[in-house]
């Protein structure tokens, strides 16, 4: 640990343990992605992700967290994050964000993706999903310069530009022996750039963008976050380790090599 925020630094062996949690998280989310289609219920999708985590020897870090009742958060259209999977059935053209994580041997993984069900109904939805995804990777790549944690938000903001709104009040975070840890990782530029990026830091980077405004409301279930103006939203996330040798995206099978290459960032081998 170091600094006022008591940031947990991991050893290389601990990062390897987190990699196992990250890969299981990826497997669970990919199983849900493969099942996305018109007519499937959110509850069915949650059960698919839960079974992959169970079969892989992990547990969900969402289920029971502050009373959360499901394995995954599945957020549709104007729902930004923390959508509780129930009997809602997906339709052609829905924008669906799936957020989940696994715990393996006490170490956490956390990741999210957004996809469009079937054929996109609106080119603006495609731009929303792809711009948010690119902003995620721009934010991750910013860590390679070993500057400050706040550089992530600056990179996200630059990647989003003025085409979309960046959701206010929801951020990335440190991760390791708990799902949510210091430091907070903002998705926009701020004057106070935060702690210095150091080897051993593990961060969950997760931009959330909308086709409209940045204001949100929380529904009566005290979980579901929706855009105040009803605009559609997207959410992407990966768990990233900062190593002496470089960056390693723990929830990506290739460690992030393919996506980060576009930013001139090389992922260490092994």
Image (spheres, helix red, strand yellow):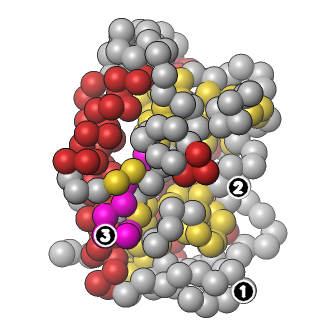
Mark identifier at residue 105: 3
* Residue at the image position 74 percent from the left and 33 percent from the top: 218
The secondary structure making up most of the magenta span is: strand
Q: What residue is rendered at 53% in x and 81% in y?
A: 8
**Mark 1 to mark 3 CA distance (whole Å):** 28 Å
| Magenta span contains residue 173 | no
Residue at disc 3, secondary structure? loop
Pointer 2 and pointer 1: residues touching (CB < 8 Å)?
no
| Mark 2 closeness class: few <14, some 14–19, many ≥20 residues within 10 Å | many
Front residue of 43 and 76: 43
Q: Which of marks 1 and 3 is nearer the N terminus?
A: 1
Residue at 37 percent of width and 70 percent of height: 106
Mark 2–mark 1 Cα distance, whole angstroms, equals 22 Å
- In this rendered view, identify the residue nearer to me: 8 or 199: 8
Report which residue position mark 2 lands on.
188
Few, some or many C-alpha atoms within 10 Å of disc 1 (few <14, some 14-19, many ≥20)? Answer: few
Residue 3 quadrant? bottom right
Residue bearing the label numbered 1: 4
Indicate the position of residue 111 as horizontal and vertical percent values.
43, 50
Image height check: is 114 above or below 102? above
């Amino acid at each position: 640990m170091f600094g006022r925020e008591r940031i947990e630094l991991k050893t290389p062996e601990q990062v390897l343990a987190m990699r196992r949690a990250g890969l299981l998280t990826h497997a669970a989310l990919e199983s849900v992605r493969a099942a996305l289609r018109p007519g499937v219920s959110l509850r069915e999708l949650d059960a698919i992700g839960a079974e992959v985590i169970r079969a892989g020897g992990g547990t969900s870090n969402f289920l029971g967290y502050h009373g959360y009742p499901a394995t995954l958060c599945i957020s549709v259209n104007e729902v930004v994050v923390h959508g509780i999977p129930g009997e809602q059935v997906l339709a052609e053209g829905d924008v669906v964000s799936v957020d989940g994580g696994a715990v393996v041997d006490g170490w956490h993984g956390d990741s999210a993706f957004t996809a469009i069900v079937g054929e996109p109904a609106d080119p603006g939805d495609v731009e929303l999903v792809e711009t948010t995804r690119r902003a995620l990777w721009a934010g991750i790549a910013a860590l390679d310069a070993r500057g400050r944690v706040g550089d992530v938000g600056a990179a996200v903001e630059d990647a989003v530009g003025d085409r979309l709104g960046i959701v206010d009040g929801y951020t990335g975070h440190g991760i390791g022996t708990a799902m949510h840890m210091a430091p907070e990782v903002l998705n926009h530029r701020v004057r106070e750039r935060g702690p210095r990026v150091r080897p051993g830091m593990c961060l969950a980077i997760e931009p959330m963008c909308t086709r409209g405004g940045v204001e949100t409301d929380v529904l009566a279930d005290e979980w579901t976050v929706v855009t105040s103006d009803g605009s559609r939203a997207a959410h992407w996330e990966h768990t990233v380790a900062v190593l002496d040798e470089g960056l390693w995206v723990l929830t990506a099978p290739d460690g992030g090599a393919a996506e980060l290459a576009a930013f001139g960032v090389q992922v260490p081998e092994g």
